Image (cartoon, helix red, strand yellow):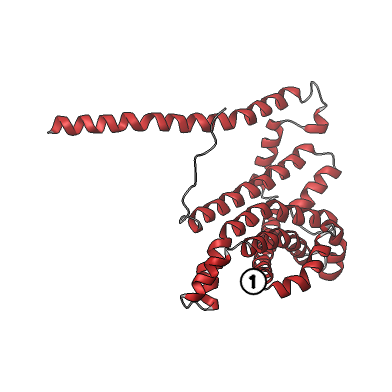
């Protein structure tokens, strides 16, 4: 009996080993292009292109260490982080409410959709000076600009998701006695959830763009101001260090929204087969 159990455990471990190796191989395959680019960049800086233009990956890592070791970057991180969280949160909340309201009411959609489309066509970056006049050079103007950029992406995804709900499902729920609150929580929101998550993920880089553009225009603190000052003083390592920190913001936010997607949409079953390797 013990021999049978041992053989079973050995066979299970043997069957689990290939998928584990494949997973690590896939991760390594993802990292290879980035590592190759960094290696080429390190070699080309100073040989093909002057280092004053692109710096070196090693110099950028050293600059990052200096920024965090000295504490110079922390006030900028705190300011930009506040602006991103508030701007993203306000934009997402307003986009969900607006998209749901217009998606549920064809009459409201006919009235307000032309105005939303017209305002959507205005370059948001052109609004930065106006927001600075209204809200000052502090956090408020950056939050407003980031909120506007996030709002439209979330709004149109939610609007499309709510409008795309199968009318037969809604009628069936009404026949079974569902009220408007139950329709919202049990029919419309679950059906629109993939669209909401898609809009939230798409809006992350736009929130960063809104905040950084606002800080470029006028600010007291923030990563945008830090990058602008590094550019003005011909410090490419400092510029790339600021960009790396912004990339970390985007990657972290995408990881959070990805986990939120898996949690909220865990009821969905994957349909069909995945794409085949070519």
Q: Nearer the viewer, residue 20 or 178?
A: 178
Residue 139 x %, y %: 75, 64
- Residue 130 in the figure: left or right of residue 181: right
Q: Is residue 25 above or below residue 205?
A: above
Question: Residue at left 48%, top 47%?
Answer: 270
Q: Nearer the viewer, residue 258 or 250?
A: 258
Q: Is residue 66 above or below residue 139?
A: above
Question: Residue at left 74%, top 60%?
Answer: 146
Q: Is residue 56 above or below residue 188?
A: above
Which of the 4 quarters of the picture holds residue 78? Answer: bottom right
Q: Which residue is mark 1?
A: 104
Residue 135 x %, y %: 81, 69
Question: Residue at left 55%, top 72%?
Answer: 184
- Residue 143 in the figure: left or right of residue 17: right
Q: Secondary structure at mark 1?
A: helix
Q: Quadrant of the C terminus?
A: top right
Residue 67 x %, y %: 68, 45
Q: Nearer the viewer, residue 57 or 253?
A: 253
Density class for disc 1 (Cα within 10 Å; few <14, some 14-19, many ≥20) is some
């Amino acid at each position: 009996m013990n021999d049978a159990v041992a053989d079973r455990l050995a066979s299970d471990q043997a069957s689990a080993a290939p998928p584990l190796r494949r997973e690590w191989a896939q991760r390594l395959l993802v990292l290879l292009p980035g590592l190759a680019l960094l290696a080429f960049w390190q070699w080309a800086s100073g040989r093909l292109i002057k280092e004053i233009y692109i710096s070196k990956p090693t110099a950028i890592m050293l600059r990052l260490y200096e920024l965090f070791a000295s504490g110079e970057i922390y006030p900028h991180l705190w300011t930009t982080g506040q602006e991103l969280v508030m701007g993203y949160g306000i934009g997402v909340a307003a986009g969900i409410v607006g998209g749901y309201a217009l998606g549920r009411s064809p009459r409201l959609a006919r009235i307000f959709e032309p105005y939303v489309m017209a305002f959507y066509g205005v370059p948001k970056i052109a609004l930065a000076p106006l927001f600075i006049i209204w809200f000052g050079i502090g956090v408020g103007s950056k939050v407003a600009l980031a909120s506007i950029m996030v709002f439209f992406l979330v709004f149109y995804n939610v609007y499309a998701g709510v409008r795309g709900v199968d009318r037969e499902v809604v009628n069936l729920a009404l026949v079974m006695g569902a009220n408007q609150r139950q329709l919202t929580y049990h029919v419309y929101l679950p059906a629109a959830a993939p669209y909401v998550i898609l809009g939230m993920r798409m809006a992350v880089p736009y929130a960063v763009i809104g905040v950084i553009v606002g800080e470029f225009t006028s600010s007291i603190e923030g990563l945008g101001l830090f990058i602008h000052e590094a550019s003005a003083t011909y410090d490419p390592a400092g510029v790339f260090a600021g960009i790396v920190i912004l990339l970390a913001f985007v990657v972290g936010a995408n990881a959070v929204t990805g986990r939120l997607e898996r949690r909220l949409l865990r009821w969905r079953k994957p349909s069909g087969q995945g794409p085949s390797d070519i």
